[in-house]
């Protein structure tokens, strides 16, 4: 199974996808005149402008739902893997892909808002919707929707639950080893963890998108702030070593080996997995928000990439590097000389590096702290995955009728979470990376095509900046005036307001 997954992963995550992610981010940064820098203050202001309505969630709730997908295992175990496989220089390329990806996040999330729909009293949207409406290709939209359901409903959840299980094992001990027959021998700790996570997950996802939004708007800021505070504390305890760490990251980012493979590949790969810019997940949450203009939510989602990578991922990286709680392995999995600081048997795909880093500063508390933080990080990501999968099921439901489709989806996702919690880290990550890669291929190609077919997201940005410069008290969006076709929701809203 592992060999099959690795082979597929090798095709999906080939060099062209790395260049596509970086290239698209650069292109959209230039086209938007680096909106991620110019309108940074506006991004923060917009977080607290829109309010929740009966049909949609607020901008802050949409940010929380989106961040619940972005801030997850990738921020703890993913950063550890980037360092373990790509070296310290991989962190520099995670920063680069986040900076450029912020512009990509604006484009895809603005598109999600422009082409959203209202269904059964709730807003829904995402790549499948804008591929059909803006590109005019139902077949392409169906492919993306099916791929996303498989990725977020079956492949990606196992990565999150696997990290929770591994962190619990390290923090609280294996307990009794149980021979389960079908699943092989697993620790009692992992089994109990899997049952608890699946039970809580089931309770929340059967409550709908509003329950997900209300849960994440409380949990996400709290868990991210607490984690970053601990990271800052550890860095301050080792402040004299920080300049050397920054130098190490930059120096290792531009070696011949880094540029031709290692650091660039793993930095981009884990960066995309973590911040999801261009992957096509963010537009789903963006479309659900209640805003006066599509560009507003595009800007809010661009900001979420900064929070994920430049704040949370950087916090993890600094903790690991500054405490030397890591190894860098070669293609055979053997630690490299000069970057071998902990037990060679540790799998870089697990959160162990991060737990060892915090444990070195908080003896007896570090491992449990990271395990608890990871639980919240990963659990809220599972909720976001369900919402994304549900949105694409709702999209396909208009064309294909499947009895009890949402019940089937919920049970399948819960089964994937249980299975992932008790499987090996390498297999879980391999499956998840296939899901991320396939979505990224489909979505980035789509938004690039849409640029040549009418540039709706760029037109929305220009319109928003024009109204902002004019000092309007309330923004409005008229797609017909801008030459944007098939934006039916906004067209109807404009007609109703006239």
Image (tube, grey):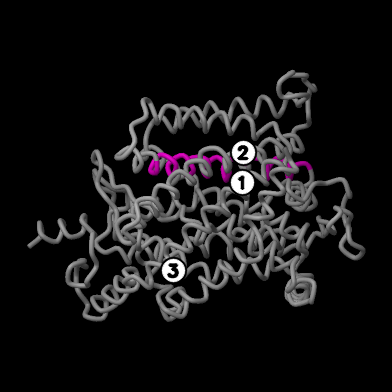
Q: Distance between the residues labelled 1 and 3?
A: 24 Å
Res 158 label: 2
Give me the C-alpha separation between circle 1 and circle 2: 7 Å
Vertical comparison of 231 with 385: above or below? below
User: Can residue 372 be found in the magenta stretch?
Assistant: yes
Observer-side mark, 2 or 3, equals: 3
Tell me the residue that label 3 is attached to.
448
Would you say 352 lies left or right of 479 here?
right
Q: Which is in the foreground here, disc 1 or disc 3? A: 3
Identify the residue shown where x is 58% and y is 65%: 310
Disc 3 secondary structure class = helix
Label disc, if present, on residue 296 of the rendered structure = none
Left or right? Give the position of 335 relative to 480.
right
As measured in the structure, the alpha-carbon distance from the residue carrying label 2 to the one carrying label 3 is 30 Å
- Give the class, few, some or many, for how many residues have Cα within 10 Å of label 3's Cα (few <14, many ≥20): some
Q: Give the range drawn in magenta.
A: 364-392
Which dot marks residue 432? 1
- Whether residue 338 can be seen here: yes
Where, by quadrant of the figure, is residue 387 drawn? top left
Labelled pair 1, 2 in contact (Cβ < 8 Å):
yes
The quadrant of the picture occupied by the C terminus is: bottom left
Residue found farthest to the left: 498
| Secondary structure state at the residue bearing disc 1 | helix
Q: Position of residue 270 (x, y in %)?
A: 64, 58
N-term mark: 1 or 3: 1
Q: Which residue is drawn at 49% across and 68% down?
A: 102
């Amino acid at each position: 199974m592992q060999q099959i997954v690795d082979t597929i992963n090798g095709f999906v995550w080939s060099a062209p996808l790395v260049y596509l992610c970086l290239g698209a981010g650069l292109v959209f940064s230039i086209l938007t005149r680096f909106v991620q820098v110019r309108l940074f203050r506006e991004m923060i202001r917009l977080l607290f402008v829109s309010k929740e309505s009966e049909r949609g969630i607020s901008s802050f709730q949409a940010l929380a739902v989106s961040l619940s997908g972005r801030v997850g295992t990738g921020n703890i175990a993913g950063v550890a893997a980037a360092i373990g496989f790509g070296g310290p220089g991989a962190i520099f390329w995670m920063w680069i892909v986040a900076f450029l990806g912020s512009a990509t996040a604006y484009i895809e999330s603005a598109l999600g808002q422009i082409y959203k729909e209202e269904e059964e009293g709730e807003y829904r949207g995402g790549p499948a919707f804008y591929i059909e409406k803006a590109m005019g290709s139902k077949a392409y939209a169906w492919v993306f929707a099916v791929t996303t359901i498989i990725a977020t409903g079956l492949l990606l959840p196992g990565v999150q639950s696997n990290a929770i299980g591994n962190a619990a094992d390290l923090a609280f001990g294996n307990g009794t080893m149980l021979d389960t027959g079908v699943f092989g021998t697993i620790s009692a700790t992992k089994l109990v963890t899997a049952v608890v996570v699946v039970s809580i997950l089931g309770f929340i996802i059967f409550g709908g998108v509003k329950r997900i939004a209300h849960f994440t708007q409380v949990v996400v800021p709290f868990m991210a702030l607490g984690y970053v505070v601990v990271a800052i504390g550890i860095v301050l305890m080792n402040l004299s070593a920080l300049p050397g760490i920054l130098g190490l990251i930059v120096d290792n980012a531009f070696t011949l080996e880094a540029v031709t493979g290692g650091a660039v590949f793993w930095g981009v790969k884990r960066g995309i997995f973590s911040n999801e810019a261009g992957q096509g997940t963010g537009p789903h949450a963006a479309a659900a928000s209640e805003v006066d203009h599509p560009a507003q939510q595009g800007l809010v989602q661009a900001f979420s990439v900064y929070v994920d990578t430049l704040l949370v991922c950087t916090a993890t990286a600094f903790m690991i590097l500054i405490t030397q709680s890591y190894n860098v392995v070669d293609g055979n999995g053997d630690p490299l000389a000069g970057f071998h600081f902990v037990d060679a048997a540790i799998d870089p795909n697990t959160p162990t590096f991060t737990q060892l880093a915090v444990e070195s500063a908080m003896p007896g508390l570090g491992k449990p702290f990271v395990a608890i933080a990871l639980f919240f990080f990963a659990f809220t990501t599972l909720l976001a995955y369900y919402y994304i999968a549900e949105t694409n099921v709702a999209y396909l439901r208009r064309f294909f009728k499947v009895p009890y489709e949402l019940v089937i989806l919920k049970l399948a996702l819960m089964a994937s979470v249980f299975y992932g919690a008790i499987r090996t880290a390498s297999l879980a990550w391999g499956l998840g990376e296939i899901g991320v890669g396939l979505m990224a291929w489909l979505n980035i190609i789509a938004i690039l095509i849409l640029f040549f077919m009418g540039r709706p997201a760029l037109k929305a940005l220009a319109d928003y900046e024009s109204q902002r410069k004019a000092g309007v008290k309330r923004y409005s969006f008229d797609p017909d005036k801008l030459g944007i076709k098939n934006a039916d929701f906004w067209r109807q809203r404009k007609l109703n307001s006239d």
